[in-house]
Image: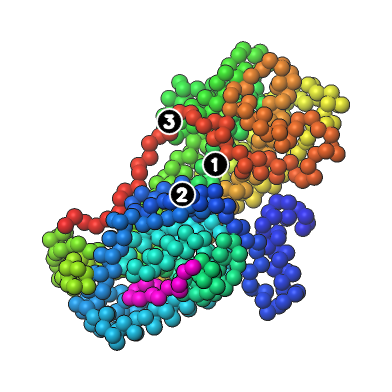
Amino acid sequence: MLDRIAARKPKIFFRALAVTLALFAAPALAFEATTTYQPITETAAGKTITLTGHDLTVEQVVDIARNGAKVELSAEALQRSADAYGLLLQGAAEGVTIYWFNRGAGDQRETVIFSGDPTTSENTKLLKDQQLARFKGGVTRGYGPEMDDEALVRAIMAIRANTMSYEAASPQLTRSLVDMLNKRLTPVVQSRGTLGEGDLATLGNIGAAMVGEGEAYFRGVRMPAAQALAEAGLKPLEPFAADQAALISTNAYAQAQAALLVEDARKLLEWTDLSYAMGLTGMNSSVTPISVPVQSMRPYEWLTWDAARIMDMIKGSYLFDEDPARIIQDPESMRASSQRQGSAWQFWAELRHSVLLSINSSDHNPAILPGLTPQSSWELSTPQFMQYYIKGGPLSKGKSGYIFSNANWDPYPLANQVEAFTIALTNMGVAVAQRIERFRNPFFTVIKPADVLSADERKDIPTFDGYLPTDLWQELAGMGTPVTPAGQAIVATVEDLEAQTRIKTERAREAVDLSFHLLAQDLLTASYWMELRKAQKPERKFGEAPTAALAALRKVIPWHQPAAERPKRPLGMVAYDFMQDNPAANFYPGGPQAPKSATAPTAGVLPN
């Protein structure tokens, strides 16, 4: 049984094995790191991405997180951050009640922390000592297992550096986060401890490393955080004011998971389209369902786009030639695949839009709004709002503004859209699983392999497990059930909603990876039957993209190869690795223009 687990889910298998060994070898350390760390490869180390707070893209997050690109903040972002920081200090000096600064947080929201000007010697000492203690305390926050993917931690840091430009972060906090990214100093971060709305524990781990507490990886090597800072040529952060709140009050963990999900899902959907096109040529399909006239009868834009995309892939193939052996109608799983795939693309686009908005706006509590006056919006002049008005003075360089308690940390609709995409993915996956099985039925294929290939030819042709696609599908199917909404009243019942975005994004990313494994079986099936159709009639053509993909696949999985020379691992894993190493866009870079999705709105404040 263990070998089956290892074959299907190697990361989970080896993690469990490591935990078991740790329990026997060192019981006291059983809950420490036991996973294999996955460092990044710095293929974009020479690139610098400017963070403005407005236009960070998923592709840029990936470049920073996975490829080691450097970051810098734009002059505008630095000024916006400085204005928010000045307003925070000035607000306290004017006696305005400010959540998580001169008042406590959560159930301590009415507790007075200090009064008056925060820059007096007495208050300065109090705040420096308080903030340093809070940052150091972050080392014990969260719960294992540790995040074993350096790219995920870097994505969290990059997104927070971008969104923190809206918050009242001290200049030294902003510099520290950027410097750690650019020096590739990556804190050790626990994967659990957030309820999916306000990833406090996660960012607390990062904050601890900033002040030299706990452990971190410097250029992929694990060491004490203080040593990592020294080797990177950085000094430990000296936090002040409300720096802990500015750093940790964010959904950057969920946003990072969602951004990486969007990137990986795009690659999956591109391969799903190409594998389907290859399957059509392997089935000798009747392709009338994806024709323009048929699609125009029900013009959902993403569905018609996907059908046109598939049709373009098989253009020039033998499927457009007359063939009396071709049946009038394929199984439903073949006919309706473009409907399922187009629907998955639609939900992917909606998720992508939400991610772009989320990583380019503030999710912090309190909201810091420099530049506003009571005349900026009618409600701001009412007594309720005026108690949070900051007139402006030396600490804010004369700028007025407001600081409001809010619920911008509640990660909706993003949390809904992650699950909506996961459901769309499983509805697509069932079609993939079913169309694989239909190739076993001569009612649809008309021919059997034995009709085309002799016994001698078949013995050197790779075969694959007929049970595996169903096994993979059954596992994927369970991921299509949404996480039950929860409202557990905690922190003296002040915090009575939980979004579970950590669970939702982790499940979605696992569903994408599992879908890739299922699709590997689809690719093996499609390519096998393409070879059979070519053996039937060598002059047959399949279209440029399917032909190119088949040729590339045959370099790693030859069509004729004695059993003794084949890789001693499941062919599906070889095909999975092939798809990871060779994006479908390598074989089909163009195609019809995708439907236009609205770009993420620019975050900002009301006009003066």
Quadrant for the N terminus, please: bottom right
Q: Quadrant of residue 37?
A: bottom right
Sequence order check: which comes first, mark 2 or mark 1? Answer: 2
**Is residue 330 covered in magenta?**
no
Amino acid bearing label 3: Gln
The residue pinned by badge 3 equals 593
Bin the neighbour count of mark 2 within 10 Å (Cα to Cα): few under 14, some 14-19, many 20 and up.
some
Q: Are marks 2 and 1 in contact (CB under 8 Å)?
A: no
Amino acid bearing label 1: Lys
Which residues are drawn in magenta? 233-244
Sequence order check: which comes first, mark 1 or mark 3? Answer: 1
Is 607 in front, or is 105? 607
Mark 2, secondary structure of its residue: loop
Does residue 544 lie above or below 582 as drawn? above
Amino acid bearing label 2: Lys
What distance separates the C-alpha of mark 1 from that of mark 3? Answer: 17 Å
Query: What residue is rendered at 34% in x and 74% in y?
Result: 242
Whether residue 499 is visible: no
The residue pinned by badge 1 equals 267
The residue pinned by badge 2 equals 47
Query: What residue is rendered at 17% in x and 68% in y?
Result: 398
Q: x%, y% of residue 300? A: 42, 33
